Image (cartoon, helix red, strand yellow):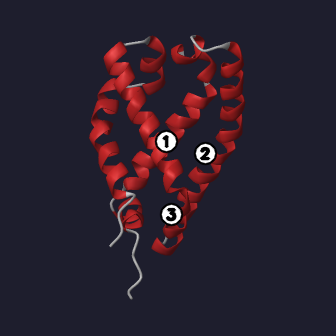
Amino acid sequence: MPEKIWLGAIYLKDEGGYEIVLKSLNHYKQRLKTLHNSPELKNAAAMFASVLNQQAIKTIPEIDRIIQKIQNSLSEIKSVNSLIEDISFLEKALSCYYSDICKAEDTGHEYFVKLVGNMQDARNDKETIRMALRKIKQYS
């Protein structure tokens, strides 16, 4: 029986998908660093906010590890295949960025607008994010 090939690796390396993934990971990292300013968290109970902030602090080094892993693996497809174990984390980062873009558009809340940055670029990223979410899970 032939071995399945992770087409997500081809998307990341050869189709430039790594760019939106890196952008999303950096956004996710910034989101976690500023979580204490999030309007969603300001309405949460103090204990719940504390737990989320502690989790955020623990997650940031994981983001840094995956960013470095992506940057180190772009030279050859076999190295990119090692990212298969991080698919769920990549999906989380992409979904976070997409969600924050939507919140910035829908609410216009200063926190989300500032977090997203250039809204025109962010609007253009939405379709790229949707494509990335589809392609990183594909196998042949």
The correct choice, above or below, for 132 with respect to 47 in the image is below
Q: Please name whichever residue, 81 or 72, is drawn nearer the observer in this view of the structure.
A: 81
- Image quadrant where residue 103 sits: top left
Q: Please name whichever residue, 1 or 118, is drawn nearer the observer in this view of the structure.
A: 1
Q: Residue at x 46, y 72 (%)?
A: 77
Mark 3 → mark 1, Cα distance in angstroms: 15 Å
Indicate which disc, 3 or 1, sits on the residue closer to the N terminus.
Answer: 3
Mark 2 → mark 3, Cα distance in angstroms: 15 Å
Residue, disc 2: 63
Tag 3, which secondary structure? helix
The correct choice, above or below, for 2 with respect to 39 in the image is below
The correct choice, above or below, for 34 with respect to 74 in the image is above
Tell me if mark 1 has few (under 14), some (14-19) or many (20+) residues whose alpha carbon lies within 10 angstroms of its own: many
Residue 93 - label = 1
Residue, disc 3: 84
Tell me if mark 3 has few (under 14), some (14-19) or many (20+) residues whose alpha carbon lies within 10 angstroms of its own: some
Q: Position of residue 101 (x, y in %)?
A: 37, 28
Q: Residue at x 49, y 16 (%)?
A: 111
Query: Could you tell me the amino acid type at mark 1?
Result: Ala
Q: Please name whichever residue, 136 or 47, is drawn nearer the observer in this view of the structure.
A: 47
Indicate which disc, 1 or 2, sits on the residue closer to the N terminus.
Answer: 2
Q: Residue at x 35, y 61 (%)?
A: 11
Q: Quadrant of the N terminus?
A: bottom left
Say whether marks 1 and 2 touch (CB < 8 Å). Answer: yes
Query: Could you tell me the amino acid type at mark 2?
Result: Ile
Say whether marks 3 and 1 touch (CB < 8 Å). Answer: no
Query: Could you tell me the amino acid type at mark 3?
Result: Ile
Q: Residue at x 43, y 42 (%)?
A: 94
Q: Position of residue 37 (x, y in %)?
A: 59, 16
